[in-house]
Amino acid sequence: MFDTSSTTSAWAAQWKMRLIRVFGVIYFSAVCAAQITEDVPPVPSLQLQSSWLEVYPSEKATFRCEINNPSEWNFIWLRDKRQIPDSDPNVSLSADGSVLTITATNLAQSGSYTCKGKHKTKGTTTVESDPRQLSVSQPPPNPTLKRLTQWLDVFEDEIVAFGCEFGNPDWTLTWYKNQKELKVDPFISLDEEGTLLNITSASKAHEGEYACKAQLDSRSVSSGFSNTATVTIYDNIPKPTLRRAPGFDPMFVGETVNFTCSVDVSSGWVYEFQKGEKILPATGKIHSFQLALSDQGKYMCSATRGKDTSTEDSEEMQLNVLEIPVPSLKKEPSWLDVFPEESVQLSCGMDSGSGWTYTWTRDGQKVGPGGVVSFDQSGSTLSIKSATSANKGLYKCKGELKERSVSSIYNTGLSLTVYAEKPRVTLIQEPDYRVMFPGESVTYSCHLNVSSGWEYLWYKDGKELSVSDKKYSVTSVSTTNAGSYSCKAKRGTHQVFLTDQSNVKQLQIQGNRPKPLMTQQPNANNVYVGESVSFKCKVEGSTGWRYLWYKDGAQLSTVGDTLTFTTSFLNKGTYKCSAIRDKTNYPTEHSDTRTLMVSEIPVPSSKKEPSWLDVFPEESVQLSCGMDSGSGWTYTWTRDGQKVGPGGVVSFDQSGSTLSIKSATSANKGLYKCKGELKDRSVSSIYNSGLTLTVYAEKPRITLTQEPDYTMYPGERVTYSCHINVSSGWKYLLYKDGKELTKSKKFLFNATKNGSYSCKAQRGTEQVFSTDQSNVKQLQIQERPLASITLLTGWSEVFSAVSLELKCVVEEDNEKWNYTWFKEGQRIENSVSKQHSVTPDNDPDQSHYICQGIRNVRPFYSRKSEQFITKNLLLKRRLLLSISGLIFFGIIAVLIGCIACRVFRKPADDDEGPEEADLFLSMAQQKGAGVPCPLVEFITDSTLNSPSKEGEGNGMICSETEPLPITAQEDQAGTAEGADTAETNGGLVSFKQ
C-alpha cells in the first residue's frame, strides 16, 4: 500500500523549487543586462577636415575624432595600428586631443590613420574608428627651361625664345627674370598655356637670368625654380679670330692642322673658312685636315647666324708646308765589318731644322739602349762598345719632331757585319818551304781577308821586327835567318783593335845538298807483264821539289815525284831520279839506282780429287788450283762465270787454292775456273780453262741383272751383274738375303737354293760415297720333274707273260721327252724310248732299273726315277694267286654261312639288346672308309720289294683293270694330288702333279 498524502506533498515541493529557480534566473538576467548596457563604450568616428588625402611636403592634413560625451574621453591616435607619439614635431593636437593636424615632411607619414577613446574615470577603451588613408607624395619636380634659339648672347633686335616643360597640365607655369616674376612688355609674349616665352626684339632691358616655376591651382603648392638661362645683349657684332694648331712654322706634309674660327661673344655662329678666294668645306668652328704641299697659302674665316647677322672676315694667316726630310746615316770609323770587342758609331741626322729625335731599327726590330748599345740625348748617335755577333744587322733610322706627329720614313740604312770571332791573321810564306838551303829567297805576307784599315806587326822568335808593311822578304837566306815567324794586325785610333797572333811559320836552313830516296812499289826485282809498277822519288825533310827520272842513264819525259807504268818487256832496265826546287831551281844529287826485271804472268793449273768430275748428292769433291812456280799466290774461283765464295757446302783453304764441296747438290754443278793473284800486288793471272763438274740431281740408280732371268732348276748356272751407267771409280757389293757375299761386279754360281739378291756401289777413300740399294732379284729354284717307272703288264698278264713292260713317265709331260734307261746304275745303250721290256734273256738276274727324261728345252733333263726291282717277281705272283684264292673261297663260305643263319636263326625280340656291329666291311664300305686293298698293301710293301726280300714272290693286285704301281710308298706320297713337299734347306719347291 502507498502513502498517498506523502507522495502528493513531495510532488508539490519539487514544483515549488522549480518555480523559484526560474524566477531567479529571470531576475538576475535583467539585472546583468542593465549593468552591461550601462558599461558598453561608444564607437568613435574619424572625420577629414582638410579637402584632400594626398598631400605634398609642407602641406597640412587635419583629422577629427568624434565620440559621444567627448569631455569624458581622452583621444588616442594611431597610424598603421601604431600609436602616434605626442613628441612627433610634425604632429599637432587640439586642446581636447580630438583634432590631429599633420604637416607633411616625408613619405613615412603616409599610412592608415585611426582613433579611439579611453574613458577618463572608468579606464575603458573604445574600439578603433574606421581608417582613413593618407598619402604623402614626393615633392613636385622642377620645370625644365629650354633654349629654343641657339644663342643667348645676342645682339640688339635679335630674337630670343624659351620653353618651360613640366609635364602636368593641372599646374600653372610662372616666368621669372632675375628671380622676380616676369613683367610682360610689348616685346615679350607668352603662349596660352604659358609654356613658351618669346623676346621678339631684344634690347638691353631684356638682359638677365630667366627661369620658370610650376604652381598647383587652389593650393599653396609650388615647384622649385627651373634651370636658368642668362641672356646677354651686345651692342656691336665682334670680328672672328682665326687660330691654328699646332702653330709650328713650317709644317710638314702629313701633319694634321686645325684652323679654329671663334667669335669671343655669343653663340650659334656658322663659320666659313677660305684659302685665298677658295671657300673651304668645314663643319663647325674648326677646319681640320692633313697637310699636303698644295695646302701652303693664306687662310681666313668669317661667321653668320640667323638670316641677318654676320661678322666681317678674320685676319689672314700664312701656312708654310714642306716635305718631311729623310735622315742621312753616317758611320765612324769607315768600316762596317767589325769584330768582337771592337767599337763602332752610327750617326743619324736631318739636313735642316732642329728639335728632331731619332728612332733606330736593326733588321726591322726597334733598337733601344741597353747592353753595349747607347745613344746620345736626341738618339742621333748610336754607339756600340765591344760589339758581339748579336749587334750585326741592317741599321736604319728615322727622325721625329718633339711634341708633333711628324715622323720621317726610315732611310736605306747601313749593314753592320759583326763577326763571331776575331779575324784570323794568316801568315803566308812564298815559297812555302819549311826547310830551305843557303842562297834561296823567301817572302812572308801577313794576310787578312776581311775589312780594311789594318796596320801590321812582325815577330821573329817572339821578338818584334821593325817592319810595318804587309810583306817581309829575305833575298838570300843563311843560317841566321832560321827561326819562327808570325804577325798581327791592328786598326783604330781612339780605341785600338788588335788581332790575335797569326799562325807561325818555322824556317829551317840546312847546309848540305840533299839526296832523294827512290822506292819501288811493288818492292820486287821481278815483276810481271801487265803489272802496275810505281817508282817514287822523295827528298826527305823538305818540300817544293820537281823530280827528274832516268832509265839506263837517259832522262825520261815523266814529271812528278812518281813514275808509274804498266810493265812490258820494254820496261826492263835500270832506274834512278833527281830533284830541282820548283821555285828556286835548287838541284839535288842523284838517287841510288834500281834494276827492274819483267816476266810473263803464269796461268794456274787445275786438278781434281777424286779423279771423276761427275758427282752425286751428298758426295764430296775437291778442286785444286796452283801455280807451277813462285809463292804468295791467292786464288779466286768462278763457277759458270760467277765468283764462288765460301758458304754452305763450299769451303776453301787459307790461300783459296783448294775448293772443297762437302755433300754436293745440283747447285754446285758447272764449269769451275780459277786464277791466281799475288798478295799485296796488283798481279792477277787469267782464268784457266777450268774443269766441268757435273752434279746429278739424285743418287745413281744401280741395277742388278740376273742371267738367265727366270726360275732355275737345281744345278743350272746363274750370273748376277751389278751395273751403274754413270761416272767411274765404283766398287761393288753383292748381298744375298741382306748379307754381304762378295765384292765383285759379277757373281757366277750353280743354283741350289732360293734367295733375295741385291747390290750397292761405293767409291772414295777418305769419305766413302755409297749408292742406294739396287733392285732386288729373287732367285727361285724349281725342282726338276720326277721320272717314274710304271709296270704296263696287267694283272692278268702277270701270270702268263714271258716279259715285263716298263714305262717311264715324267711329271711334266706337256713337252716331248726322250728317255734314258739305266740298269744297275749303267746306261742301257740304244734305249731311248718311253717303254722298256725286261725279258729273261736281257735280265736273267732280275736287276734294278732307273729311267730319266731328256729333251732340248728347259728343263733339259728330269730327275731320275726310283729303282724298279724285278727280282722275286714270280714268287710274288704265286703268293698273290694263293691269297686271291683264299679270299675268293672265304667270301663264298661267308655268304653260305650268312644264308644258313638267315634261314635257321630264331627271330630276336625287339626289346633285346642292340644289334651287333658288322664284323666285316663290304667292298663299298672299305672303299669309302679308305681301307687299302690287302693285295695292294702286299704288293707295294717296301719290305717285300726290298733287296733283302729277294727270295719272296711278287704280290697280287686287287683288280686286273688298273695298272700296278711299282713305286715306293714315299714316291706315291710325293705324286699324290694336293700333297706338297719342300726341301727345307735346299731351296727346293715341289709342284702339284
Image (spheres, grey):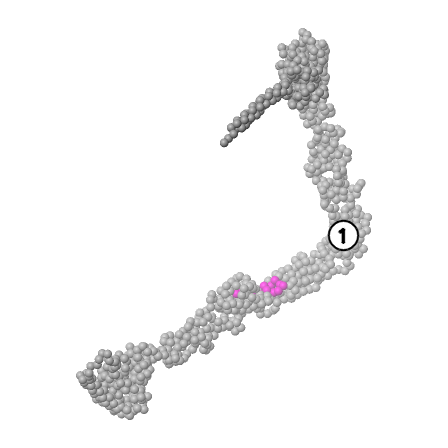
Say which residue label 1 marks: 504
Of 449 and 516, nearer the camera is 449
**Based on the displayed image, in which of its 4 quarters is residue 589 positioned?**
bottom right
**Based on the displayed image, in which of its 4 quarters is residue 185 positioned?**
top right
Q: Residue 325's spot in the image, x, y percent?
A: 71, 30
Instruction: Assess whether residue 673 is covered by the magenta stretch.
Output: yes
Give me the residue at 74% from left, 60% from top. 514
| Position of residue 896 in the picture relative to residue 587 (left or right) | left
Looking at the image, residue 336 lies above or below residue 189: below
Give me the residue at 53% from left, 68% from top. 662
Range drawn in magenta: 672-684
**Based on the displayed image, in which of its 4 quarters is residue 773 positioned?**
bottom left
Of 652 and 833, nearer the camera is 833
Give me the residue at 73% from left, 52% from top. 431
Q: Residue 593's spot in the image, x, y percent?
A: 69, 64
Q: Residue 251's spot in the image, x, y percent?
A: 71, 25
Instruction: Assess whether residue 632 is covered by the magenta stretch.
Output: no
Q: Residue furthest left?
A: 903
SS of the residue under disc 1: loop
| Position of residue 65 in the picture relative to residue 851 (left or right) | right
Amino acid type at circle 1 is Val
Of 74 and 903, nearer the camera is 74
